[in-house]
Amino acid sequence: MFSKNDSLADLYSTSFTNFSEGQIVKGKIISIGPKEVMIDIGFKSEGAVPMLEFRSEELVLGNVVEVLIESLESEDGMVVLSKEKVSKIKGWEQIVKVVQGEQVFDGRVRSKIKGGYTVDIMGIDAFLPESLSTFRGKPMSEIINQMFKFQVVKINHQRRSLVVSRKDAAAKEKESAKRKLWEEIKVGDVRQGQVKAITDFGAFVDLGGVDGLLHITDMSWSRVSHPSEVVAIGDRIEVAILNMDKDNGKVSLGLKQRSPDPWEGIEEKFPIDTKIKGKIVNILNYGLFIELEKGIEGLIHISEISWSKRINDLKETFVIGDVVEAKILSIEKQSKRISLSIKQLEPNPWEQVSDKYIPGNKVTGVIRGFSDYGAFIELPETLEGMIHVSDMSWTKKINHPQEILKKGQKIEVVIISVDPKNQRIALGLKQLTENPWSKIAEEFTVGKELEVEVIQATNFGVFVKLREDLEGLIFNTEIENSIKDQLKPGDKIRAKIIKVDIEAMKIGLSAIVSNEADKS
């Protein structure tokens, strides 16, 4: 072995018998031609190496290079040498060492061929099957002549051929990066990651080998209905490490923690009892959520909408996006809750209700709604009262208020009672007329027989019409079994009055005696 400064005498001092075909030796560049470079290896004759096997920076007279002796004598009597094959041989030896150590190594993709790719690994052409490439879907411009990490999966020493895998190398890279990342990261760190998946409850972010969960509640200080409102797959974002569970491989991430908490100093920004404006961002059965500023929301409970107006469905009155004015009632900083009220912007009309609505007085109102047990009446000053079904008629059984009343109808009613504490006004319709039951008792005496019309059959008896505005009840025990199951609305039967209850406003009848008399 010699250096650039070795003399030819030193080269020739090596015995010719030390040279053999297939041997790698050192030689000195003695001339540079247009196509060949002449090399003196200290043998009896020089050897020529094609110019293409040299890099430009190597082409300097006197430079010492390694070459392979392919033949000790050609037809022209010269030594046949190769510089390129030296690289391949040494590359092969190096690859074998790498393979034995199960390491990954760099390679450049040279071309696309049937079933895969050719890859230059340390001067050796290796085969990369398509199934092991991880290149599916990538454009050729991002593959050909590009460097990647590979792992040898098959080696043929005789042919000096290799089969390599990008897939296995990538898996090792990922595992190595994962181990390194787990050693580096700690709670409080800020890391850059890429969004790889989105679910209803959050997004999974690749931190570079370790996936972390960015929960929907940690995406923004503002309300987020779905994670896709904040991030998209492929987005690169900076997140804070909130929690780590190395044993189970879990990392909790935060995005909103990258900006100041808007709830800091909330009492100074929104003092209690002040009037504010906000936008409706959500409507639920129990109230309206109002955005006061980004990340700050308050709730107007349904009971704080109006002093008097009954609201069953908030969506009939309000729309998301509406701007409303409200009063701040309370702030709970720790639980991040602000209670708001619309109705408390106005004086409470129930405080003077007893002075304006006196029991026994008549008042006019408009029917605004119904329930199974009554009708709701809007009174002056937007107060609301209710007529119970039992206060709609002295004599007629009302099953539902809509049998006699209509929504939007203007009616006169009598004030029965006022309860300011529970915000209730009881109204009566039947009280507009005198209670007729004293006169009814005189007309329909016990023992009187008359023909009645069946109105409704129930499981406990039959309701019958005594006259157009008066009903009575025949219990099942007062009806013959032979006709009990046959009675239907519109049928006429004879009955005898057996009870008149003025206080309960009820008349009881029997159909047994009357119908037996008819048979005789």
Image (cartoon, grey):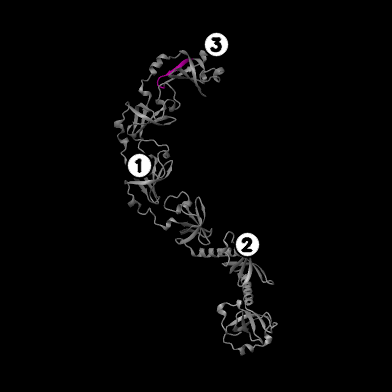
Camera-side residue of 199 and 247:
199
Q: Nearer the viewer, mark 1 or mark 3?
A: 1
Cα separation, mark 1 vs mark 3, equals: 72 Å
Q: Nearer the viewer, mark 1 or mark 2?
A: 2
Asked whether residue 104 is in view, the answer is: no
Residue 519, label in figure: 3
- Is label 1 in a helix, a strand or a loop? loop
Q: Is residue 317 left or right of residue 209?
A: left
Q: Earlier in the sequence, mark 3 or mark 2?
A: 2
The residue type indicated by label 1 comes to: Ile
- Check disc 1: other Cα within 10 Å, few if <14, some if 14-19, many if 20+: many
Q: Earlier in the sequence, mark 1 or mark 3?
A: 1
Up/down of 398 relative to 79, above or below: above
Toward the front, the furthest residue is: 34
Question: What residue did someone put label 1 on?
Answer: 342
Segment tinted magenta in the rendering? 495-504
Question: What residue did someone put label 2 on?
Answer: 130
Quick one: quadrant of the N terminus? bottom right
Asked whether residue 183 is in view, the answer is: yes
- Check disc 3: other Cα within 10 Å, few if <14, some if 14-19, many if 20+: few
- Is label 2 in a helix, a strand or a loop? helix
Where on the picture, by quarter, is residue 68? bottom right
Q: Is residue 351 left or right of residue 162?
A: left
Up/down of 228 relative to 449, above or below: below
The residue type indicated by label 2 comes to: Glu
Quick one: quadrant of the C terminus? top right
The residue type indicated by label 3 comes to: Lys
Residue 397: say if magenta.
Answer: no
Q: Residue at x 61, y 88 (%)?
A: 8
